[in-house]
Amino acid sequence: MALIVKFVLGQDFRRVRVAETSVEKLREAAREAYGTDLSSGFNLQYLDDEQDWCMLTSETLPDFLMLSEGKPVVRIQILPHPPSGGSRPAEDVDMDSRPHEQQQQQQQQQQQQQPQQQ
């Protein structure tokens, strides 16, 4: 049975017919609808019965399908991944080690200065 999906990407709505309902087919339909706008990757979300946006995965697909029963159109929100063009990944820093490192550097500097003073 075909499913009519209204994809939402920001303020851009696109309505498509999906012949086979699986996560991969829904992702494929989103890629076809939006093309290069999704080239950096994306996630899909659906609105559950408590009005929460839930991630659409193979594990949540049965819930999505159950909630979609009887609806003429279902809405799926697209969350694009940020482009990876040249930005550096965040550096993982252990904040507890910084004072210790600074203290070690100060001690090394003091040790280097001591022979000069003698």
Image: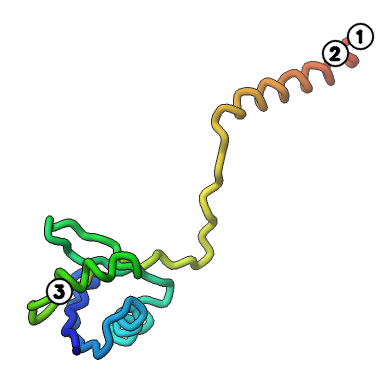
Viewer-proximal residue among 49 and 84: 49
The Cα–Cα distance between marks 3 and 2, rounded to whole angstroms, is 77 Å
- Residue 110: image location, x then y, percent: 78, 16
Viewer-proximal residue among 58 and 11: 58
The Cα–Cα distance between marks 2 and 1, rounded to whole angstroms, is 7 Å
Q: What amino acid type should be assigned to the residue bearing mark 1? A: Gln
Q: Are marks 2 and 1 in contact (CB under 8 Å)?
A: yes
For label 3, the residue is: 68
Marks 3 and 2, the one that precedes in the sequence: 3
The Cα–Cα distance between marks 1 and 3, rounded to whole angstroms, is 83 Å
For label 2, the residue is: 114
Viewer-proximal residue among 57 and 69: 69
Q: What amino acid type should be assigned to the residue bearing mark 3? A: Ser
- Residue 100: image location, x then y, percent: 65, 23
Instruction: Write the residue at 18% across / 56% down.
Output: 52
For label 1, the residue is: 118
Instruction: Write the residue at 84% across / 20% down.
Output: 112
Secondary structure found at label 2: helix
Crowd tier of the residue under label 3, counting other residues whose Cα lies within 10 Å: few below 14, some 14–19, many 20 or above = some
Q: Could one spot residue 99 in this view of the protein?
A: yes
